[in-house]
Every structure is written in structure tokens, then in C-alpha cells.
Amino acid sequence: IQLSSGPLLVPAYVKVGSGKSVKPHAVVLRREDQHTWKAGQPITLESGECQLAEVSDGEGRRQVYLNARSTGELRIEALSDDAGASFTLLNNLTLKERPNGCQGSALAFLARELPAGGGGSSETALLFSHPTAAQDWNRLDLGVYLRKSLQDDDPWGKPHIIHKGASGYSDLTCCEEEGHFGCLMECGKGEVSKCLQIAFTEFDVKEILHIV
């Protein structure tokens, strides 16, 4: 992503350790200038593929939000106050990880796009896409979650299923129409993830809020 202040950030992960004790840790690469990239501090918990989004608290303070694949039961979420150089892990985590883990996509958008200004004190709301069920390595039912505000401790809502059946990696994007979003995703028929196709679908924030 490119921050509003200019720097480019690339979400990544590194493997730390040696021999059988090598573990993955999410990390952010930042472009210092046209010729120099610098790695930030790796996330302390074991973690894999991650996604970034720039968020604002409504008082002019901008932070970088990180959402990472984990080896545990819950996704890893963290915030950075120094443009991705270091992160503080969030508490009260609720996003569930699937068995064996899976990539997920995070996207920030203006909270004013929520119906009736439902963003609370935050200027930024978040979307997250991820399989909502799994059987071993078979990931199922890709869903999109909404978090209206980080500052108000607003929890992630229930997922809106955008593909029923075999699912995998995904990538969210904003569409031109306000409150309208798209998702490029791996998906397939049935419950076996071995034969996935790439598809694109669009949805409206009202669908996630179950507003007709």
C-alpha cells in the first residue's frame, strides 16, 4: 500500500531461526527512497502472509493496521504508529483462523460510506475476507467481515458469504461507486480445494450489514 504521507509499504514474512526451529514471522518492507528498502521489526508471534491498511482515528492520527495468518486459532491483528517500522498486537481478537491457516485480505475505507454514518468516532472502517469454514486443507465459504471502528472497540461482525463452497486466497478492492466493493478470489464447486478457479465478484456494504 502507499500511505497518505507517501511511503510505500509491502506486507511480507520472514523465517527466523535455524534447523527445525525455523518459524515464520510477518514483517513490513518500507521504501525509504527510490533506491532503498528497509525491513521493520517482525511480528513477535509466529505468523505468515499479512495484509496492511491505513486507518485514521478521527483526530488526525494515522496508523497502519496489520492482519496476518497465524498458526493458532485466531488471526493476528496489530497497529503501527511509525509507518510500519514496528507493531503493537491488538487485544480482544475475534477473527478465527482456519486449520492450517489461510491468507486473508484487509481493506480500509471511509466510515462515512456506512449507512447512517455508522463508523462511530473513527474516520476509517475495515473489511476482511477469509474462508469461514474448513476441513483439513479444504477451505470453504469465503466471507467478508466488517469492523466499523477500531477506536470504539467495535467487534468484527458476522461474515457475509460471497462464495459458497471451496475457497482460498482473496483480494479486496474499492469500486468507483461509494460503498461498493470487489473481491478477486480463488473458488470452486463442492468442498474440495484442489481445483480452484479465479473469479471476481462485487458486493455492497449494505449486503454485509444485511440491509435490503
Image (tube, helix red, strand yellow):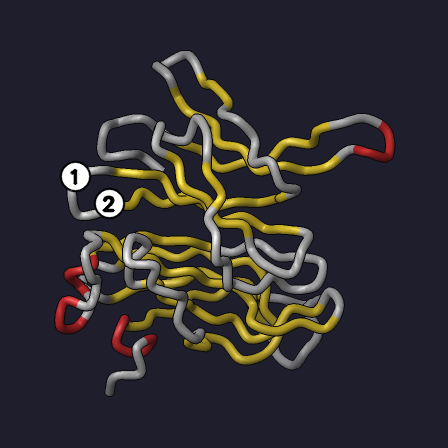
Which residue is more in the foreground, 201 or 117?
Answer: 117
Name the residue beneath numbered marker 1.
60
Q: Position of residue 24 (x, y in %)?
A: 68, 38
Q: Amino acid at mark 2?
A: Ser
The residue sitting at 37% across, 60% down in the picture is: 127
Q: Looking at the rendered structure, which numbered label has been put on residue 6?
A: none
Give residue 13's quadrant in the image. top right
Give residue 72's quadrant in the image. bottom right
The residue sitting at 31% across, 83% down in the picture is: 210
Name the residue beneath numbered marker 2.
56
Q: Position of residue 18 (x, y in %)?
A: 81, 26
Give residue 27's quadrant in the image. top right
Q: Position of residue 165 (x, y in %)?
A: 59, 78
Q: Secondary structure at mark 2?
A: strand
Q: Secondary structure at mark 1?
A: loop
The residue sitting at 49% across, 43% down in the picture is: 89
Q: Dot 1, how many residues are within 10 Å of its Cα: few (below 14), some (14-19), or many (20+)?
A: few
Q: Amino acid at mark 1?
A: Gly
Q: In the displayed structure, does residue 156 sit left or right of residue 205?
A: right
Please determine whether, in this image, residue 15 is positioned above or below residue 113: above
Q: Position of residue 88 (x, y in %)?
A: 46, 38
